[in-house]
Amino acid sequence: MKKCEEFITRKSLLYKTGVEYGDYTLNHVEGCSHGCKYPCYAYLMKKRFGVTKSYEEWIKPKLVTNVDEILDKEIPKYKNKIKSVHLCFTTDPFMYEYEDIIDQSVKIIKKLNNNGIVCTALTKGILPYNKLKDTNKNNSFGITLISLDEKYREKNEPGSAPYKERIKALKKFHDVGFKTWVSIEPYPTPNIIEQNFDDILKSIQFVDKIIFGRLNYNKLSTSYPNNKEFYNNLSDKVISFCQKYKKEYHIKKGTKTEIVNK
């Protein structure tokens, strides 16, 4: 296991997110060792605003050290407004092989749960079952899964956990009664990788919810012929699959679009 080599402090943590399927969120790490090259929207924004100078800096995560102090002040302030808190939208709470980040994330979830606040979490790492199995059963744990091809993962999510390991860890949570979900986003077009979408859906048939979204900020994706039809067809597939197996679903804004014939 690894540990962070750099640390930072923050003035605040909890905030209302603008992400369409989120409520409140927090980010207790700066950067992400998974180093996704889709490109990563969080990295693009942090670089644009001068928070991170380079990709090399981004993939060396910095852990926030004053989390407890801030949450002790913010939880009473926001408690009655919060439906759930998501970990995390600009970093990964269970960063692959980073023991101190994983432990801090578990501590945050337990602290929020102890104050009557449920959590959602999303990772490209391995969900730590033994550390979270006794938390609130209304918590919802998820993984990102946009392929089953390990060569694609190694190229585009180089620091992340293998796909099969992610799925296996998520299944443990499902089997003991936690709500589980998968984010199939950002999903690549066939000119980036040819793959069977049905195989991906079949591998996560046990989950309670699926979120599906297109790949943005990538010229290859937007240049793919009939890319709107491609994403519309897959969106319909997700909807049909979820309706058939009685699952919740969310199609990200801009993924399923109207096609105007000229």
Image (spheres, helix red, strand yellow):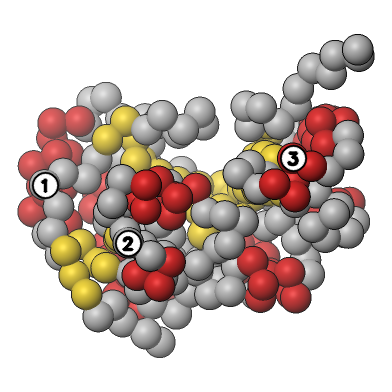
Specify the amino acid type for callout 2.
Answer: Lys
Looking at the picture, tell me which residue is in the foreground, 167 or 223: 223
- Residue 165 falls in image quadrant: bottom right
Whole-percent x and y of residue 222?
74, 40
Q: Quadrant of residue 232?
A: top right
Q: Are marks 1 and 3 in contact (CB under 8 Å)?
A: no
Question: Circle 3 is placed at which residue position?
Answer: 222
Looking at marks 3 and 2 on the same chain, the residue that comes earlier in the sequence is marked by 2
Query: Mark 1 against mark 3, which lies toward the viewer?
Result: 3
| Position of residue 20 measured from the top left corner of the image (x, y, whole percent) | 50, 28
- Distance, label 3 to label 2, CA atoms, is 27 Å
Write the residue at 58% across / 74% down.
158
Say which of 228 and 69 sits in front: 228
On-image quarter of the N terminus = bottom left
| The furthest residue to the bottom | 1
Secondary structure under badge 1?
loop
Ranked by sequence position, the earlier of labels 2 and 1 is 1
In the image, residue 95 sits, relative to residue 141, either above or below, namely below
Tell whether 255 sits left or right of 48. right
Is residue 81 visible from the viewing direction of this image? yes
Q: Which mark is residue 11?
A: 1
Q: Distance between the Cα atoms at labels 1 and 3? A: 39 Å
Q: Which residue is mark 2?
A: 53
- Viewer-side residue, 233 vs 183: 233
C-beta proximity under 8 Å, tags 3 and 2: no
Helix, strand or loop under label 3: helix
Q: Earlier in the sequence, mark 1 or mark 3?
A: 1
Kind of residue at disc 1: Lys
Total labels: the figure holds: 3
Residue at figure coordinates x 77%, y 66% from the top left: 148
Q: Is residue 4 above or below residue 224?
A: below
